[in-house]
Amino acid sequence: MVYLKMAKDNQNVDYKKLQADLEQQELESAGGVASAQVYNQLLALYLLHNDMCNAKFLWKRIPQTVKSASPETLQIWAVGQKLWLRDYPGIYEALKKEWSENTTQIMEALKAATRERAKTLVSKAYSSIDAEDFAVFMGMPLTEAIQAAIQEGWTYDSSTKYIKPKKPVSVKDPELLSEQQMSVLTDYVSFLEA
């Protein structure tokens, strides 16, 4: 039986390994039906890793008997639906539910990951954003959202109540010399002809 009980400290959990172990456990389950805990953790992990395709396929594979017997499965899927729609207020509202001991840490990590994704989105898409709108994206009270922005090195203008995010530093691909480009092109053509 794989990690059905989580470690007390989020830092010590390898979520990718846990996901792989749960996938294996689902495949090896008797009669093709795993326990609700396995489905719940696996669904939550797909959401954590922003793997919406696998989350949707898992949802379709979960037997109706498991869905109806486990209210937590429905709660996790409600979070997934909000993620799919990019309904940030809805995501944070759905994450406020009570979670079992087996999924609490994953859902907390999902909340943190959602906030990071929102922060990245704002930094890429906005040159300035109303502080209240930013708080909605972050699922935080206004003062905490402003503090989070300042901790990122962003500026907050209290007179206009706008936050100015710093643009993320983009890493450019190294430019290839013409000889290297010819070599790469030759490799592609050779591969296609083989």
Image (cartoon, rainbow, N blue to C red):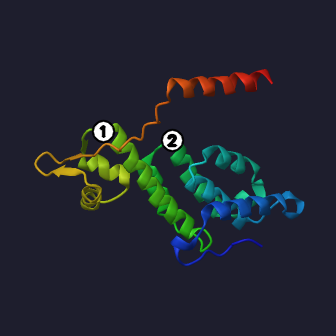
Relative to 118, is 192 on the left or the right? right
Residue, x 62% and y 53% (percent of image)?
46
Residue found at the far left of this picture: 159
Q: Where is 71 relative to 172, above or below?
A: below
Q: Which residue is mark 2?
A: 85
Residue found at the far right of this picture: 31
Give the structural element (helix, strand or loop) at label 1: loop
Give the structural element (helix, strand or loop) at label 2: helix
Find residue 1 and report its horizontal and vertical position in percent: 77, 73
Residue, x 81% and y 24% (percent of image)?
194
Label 1 crowd bin: few (<14), some (14–19), many (20+), radius 10 Å: few
The amino acid type of the residue labelled 2 equals Leu
The amino acid type of the residue labelled 1 equals Tyr
Relative to 58, is 143 on the left or the right? left
Res. 179 visible in picture? yes
Find residue 117 and report its horizontal and vertical position in percent: 44, 49
Q: Which residue is mark 1?
A: 126
Find residue 32 and report its horizontal and vertical position in percent: 85, 57
Residue, x 71% and y 46% (percent of image)?
57
Res. 69 visible in picture? no
Q: Where is 11 relative to 151, above or below?
A: below
